[in-house]
Amino acid sequence: KQEVTQIPAALSVPEGENLVLNCSFTDSAIYNLQWFRQDPGKGLTSLLLIQSSQREQTSGRLNASLDKSSGRSTLYIAASQPGDSATYLCAVRGSNDYKLSFGAGTTVTVRA
Amino acid sequence: DGGITQSPKYLFRKEGQNVTLSCEQNLNHDAMYWYRQDPGQGLRLIYYSQIVNDFQKGDIAEGYSVSREKKESFPLTVTSAQKNPTAFYLCASADTFSTDTQYFGPGTRLTVL
């Protein structure tokens, strides 16, 4: 069974600092990996999706890398802003089904 | 406006009652999913459906039931057999033939009185 871990569980940084969020997974036979953002009491918003054949994806200030062989992905957020405060979750889809396995998330606070 | 809607936003259930959570999408997505989220935990998959009139159990299906009679709709019933139903329930959909990105609804918070 796929296990997804996100460390740390919480992170607090001053505005302008770059954010580095980590995600690890136990089974490297994945189809894709997705990063989501969740604001308190809300649904999830997709940020980036990386296919298993890709090494990274970029969108604006966000960059996500994938190292399938070591079972790791990293989400970088450049020049953080208070509006980036949220919980960030990563999720992995297995290569043999349509299910996503989620990590517990990293809650980020960006201090003004 | 394209998207996923869930209703109600808040739901209160008495012991022994069945309740049904609504999920509708107008994105023409083939796949739909139900997740449960508890504080401090990641999302756990309850049921998912790839096509109309077909669905599969996820990791925590006991005490829940679903139907997929229409492509746009995937309601979830929380039965009295679910012993600890208080949680935040999220519905999602995806076009698995295209981007495969999952799009989420705003969620329903269920509380057992």
Image: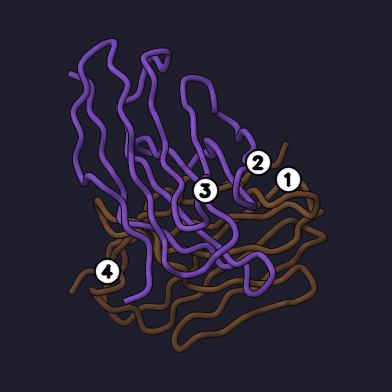
Chain colours: A brown, B purple
Q: Tell me whether the residue at label 3 lies in contact with that at label 4, contact meaning CB atoms closer than 8 angstroms.
A: no
In this rendering, position of residue A26 left or right of residue B25: right
| Quadrant of residue A112 within the rendered picture | bottom left
Q: To which residue does mark 3 refer?
A: B33
Question: Vertically, is B44 above or below A48?
Answer: above
Q: To which residue does mark 2 refer?
A: A3
Q: Are marks 3 and 1 on the same chain?
A: no
Question: Mark 4 or mark 2, which has the lower sequence index?
Answer: 2
Q: Look at the image and tell me in which quarter the N terminus of chain A lies.
A: top right
Can you give x and y, in whole percent of width and height, for residue B16 in the image?
29, 10
Q: To which residue does mark 1 refer?
A: A26
Residue sitting nearer the eye, B93 or A103: B93
Q: Nearer the viewer, mark 4 or mark 1?
A: 1
Q: Residue at horizontal 69%, vertical 69%?
A: B97
> CA gap, disc 2 to disc 1?
6 Å
Q: Chain of mark 2?
A: A
Q: Tell me whether the residue at label 3 lies in contact with that at label 1, contact meaning CB atoms closer than 8 angstroms.
A: no
Q: Nearer the viewer, mark 3 or mark 1?
A: 3
Q: Of helix, strand and loop, which one carries label 1?
A: loop
Q: What amino acid is found at the position of numbered circle 4 in the picture?
A: Val
In this rendering, position of residue A66 left or right of residue B43: right
> CA gap, disc 3 to disc 4?
32 Å
Q: What amino acid is found at the position of numbered circle 2 in the picture?
A: Glu
Q: To which residue does mark 4 refer?
A: A110
Q: Of helix, strand and loop, which one carries label 2?
A: loop
In this rendering, position of residue A63 left or right of residue A98: left
Label 1 crowd bin: few (<14), some (14–19), many (20+), radius 10 Å = some
Q: Are marks 2 and 3 on the same chain?
A: no
Q: Of helix, strand and loop, which one carries label 3?
A: strand
Question: Mark 4 or mark 1, which has the lower sequence index?
Answer: 1
